[in-house]
Amino acid sequence: MHPTADRRDALRWLANQNCVTVHAWLSRRGRLRTPDRVVFDLDPTVEDFAVVKATARTVADVLDEIGLVSYVQTTGSRGLHVVVPIKPNTDFDAVRQFARDVADVVAADDPAHRTVEARKAKRGDRLYLDVMRNAYGQTAVAPYAVRARRGAPVATPLEWDELGRRGLRADCFTIRDVPQRVAERGDPWSDMSRRGRSLTRPTQRLAKLHA
């Protein structure tokens, strides 16, 4: 059984259960086996956020080239998530394979700094493009979730041009400043649900890049 947190009272209940950081499925109630988003978890091995930002931009460029819209957020921990809204008409296995093929293209663009190697011992100092969250029953940190870390950093949706912001880190937004940020700037992900596209044609286009 999994709770559906669609009201403030539900969030209070989760907090009362000692749930600090909310993680969400990539699919919705009623269509559990067909996700409506793809997540690329950019997980750095060393503290070099410039590599994380450059990798996020490359992921976005590849996705744009094959006809998909992408969004970015800090994780509140060490990396970034690039998230892609899709039509919920593809099963998790196909979505995960699609994500892996995109990650292969991105890693091949800069193999000195990026890898799809799951084993930490084989990554060296390279950033890991983690696509394993794109599997049935897996979760990803929810936007605006608070991390149980010093300063209470928050996983925060960004505008793409904010990657160039001086001092940007994965944990730079906190529970103290995010409410004001949203009040002043709005939510960069507010239109995400309206921009989901089928993976059929993007997968065909990706095959040419991946060949």
Image (cartoon, helix red, strand yellow):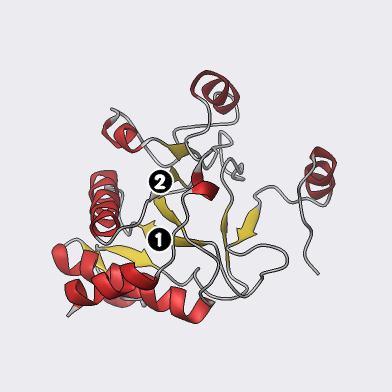
57 left or right, relative to 131: left
Residue 19 x, y percent position in the rendering: 74, 51
Does residue 44 lie above or below 163 as drawn?
A: below
Mark 2 highlights which residue?
A: 72
Contact, mark 2 vs mark 1 (Cβ under 8 Å): no
* Element carrying mark 1: strand
Task: Specify whether residue 76 is in view.
Answer: no
> Horizontal and vertical percent for residue 153?
54, 37
Q: Mark 2: which secondary structure?
A: strand
Residue 40 disc label: 1
Q: Can see residue 69?
A: yes
Q: Which image quadrant for residue 200? A: bottom left
- Label 2 packing within 10 angstroms: few (<14), some (14-19), many (20+): many
Quadrant position of residue 2: bottom right
Identify the disc placed on residue 114.
none
| Amino acid at the residue labelled 1 | Phe
Question: Residue 83 is drawn in which quadrant?
Answer: bottom left
Residue 143, how many percent across, how many down? 56, 45
Judging depth in this view, the residue of 88 and 35 nearest the camera is: 88
